[in-house]
Amino acid sequence: MARKVVITGLGATTPIGGDVPTMWKNALKGVSGAHTLEDDWVAKYELPVHFAARASTPALEVLSRVEAKRMDPSTQFGVIAAREAWADSGITEIDHDRLAVAFATGIGGVWTLLDAWDTLREKGPRRVLPMTVPMLMPNGVAAAVSLDLGARAGAHTPVSACASGTEAVHMGLDLIRSGKADVVVCGGAEAAIHPMPIAAFSSMQALSRRNDDPEHASRPYDLGRDGFVMGEGAGALVIEAEEHALARGARIYAELAGTSVTADAYHITAPDPQGLGATRALKAAMFDGRIQAEDVVHVNAHATSTPVGDKPEYTALKASLGKHVDSVAVSATKSQMGHLLGASGAVEAVLTVLAVYERKAPVTINLENQDPEIPLDVVTTARDLPAGSITALSNSFGFGGHNAVIAVRSV
Amino acid sequence: MASNEEILAGLAEIVNEETGLAPEAVELDKSFTEDLDIDSISMMTIVVNAEEKFGVRIPDEEVKNLKTVGDAVTFISSAQA
């Protein structure tokens, strides 16, 4: 019998709230975090996309100037979310050799990397900051969280594009079940609202170009969807062996019942149109958590608002839940906060845990004409979830054919 | 040409920017590593910022000789001459 793992701490900094209470309040209300970018570089580089969903609370309002100086913006967000989750867990004493970190990013220190390149070209090698390498490395965020909390059982960085944050939670569960740690701080962080990634995602036609109406640009499942909206921020969860949580009398949000990761091996960016890899991931997570289709009441969908991406997820949900798919309340929270790339799975994991704990499904905004090929029961106003034992799933899929699913059960 | 007092004040500003230490803590007899707890990476940032501020070049092999704030002030002052 696998060790039971529970969730005891939550943290987030997102485009719709700089902490978990604010994010959750807005997620139930239904707000948009997407706005026109005021930066000079939008016009300077003639970017085809003029908007994004920035973190609602700038990192420098939370961190001191000196600590922020040594962190890439993605790491700043990660540390902010991890500190909130840690404080929320109420852990005061811990064997630090039994505390691990699994903190993901999709892209890593892109601001640091490109700033250093600009500095090299404009001012020469002498001016390239000595902290450049530790700031740009993708494991920088896991390392910073480990250093901050004194986590010595390992600091890991799963990187699987937009599935990274969910894969970090999957890894956290493995670390505890396999006995390598008793407590894991897992999560994901991203800060890629920079002209280069915007240009690159634009050139692959992945971003919405609704420049005159950013608040309505992210519209998963809507017939008028035309791409995703770049977001930024971080999410973090403290997960813990149940016996460890019980021994300290912790407040337990929910059980992390099962997780899984699969790969499509189909195409480098396009999702398998049959959703086979996603179906295998859903089935594997349910098997892992001993979950029947009828147990599932809510899904926090990956649903990025791209024309090609939203449909295979429906196919996969139908294949794994069968007829029960019609009875599941589906939330597409990227409609509100955009796509946080490697952080999205972690933030959505936080929302999924809260949905189970508070028994409320968050809102999908901008759904005006639902795509008839995706006949899901989409939550457009906050909805109560049933009493009794309930389970919710959260899906994430990433370029590279990565599929990751977590299953959260009420306690 | 900056006076030694101006160099000290400028260094204190750079150290404050990098580490958050109060500028008045940056005194001539203070050791960068022992007293001000400045690690080698911060030291390199401070050196490069000092080069720009005072228009001097501080060779890498010279940095290890700059043990105290006073050493740095003396070096910068002579390099400006």
Image: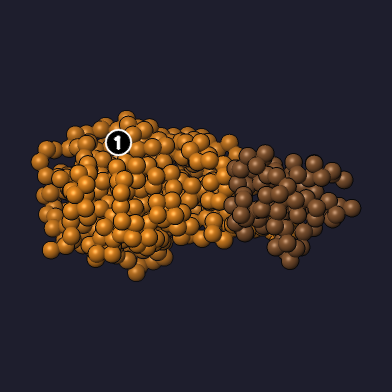
Chain colours: A orange, B brown
At a point 40% along the width and 54% down the height, the residue shown is A150
Q: Give whichever of A279, A370 is nearer the camera.
A: A279
Q: Give whichever of A362, B78 is nearer the camera.
A: B78
Q: Amino acid at mark 1?
A: Val
The quarter holding residue A281 reads: bottom left
SS at circle 1:
loop
* Residue found farthest to the right: B81
Residue A205 can be seen, yes or no: no
- Give the x, y percent position of residue A265: 34, 69
Above or below, A177 against A293 in this view is below
Name the residue tied to disc 1: A363
* Residue found farthest to the bottom: A265
- Give the x, y percent position of residue A134: 54, 59
At a point 75% along the width and 51% down the height, the residue shown is B70
Residue A232 can be seen, yes or no: yes
Left or right: A377, with A78 as reference point: left
Left or right: A241, with A82 as reference point: left
At a point 67% along the width and 49% down the height, the residue shown is B30
Left or right: A252, with B5 as reference point: left
Give the position of the N terminus of chain A as an image quadrant. Answer: bottom left
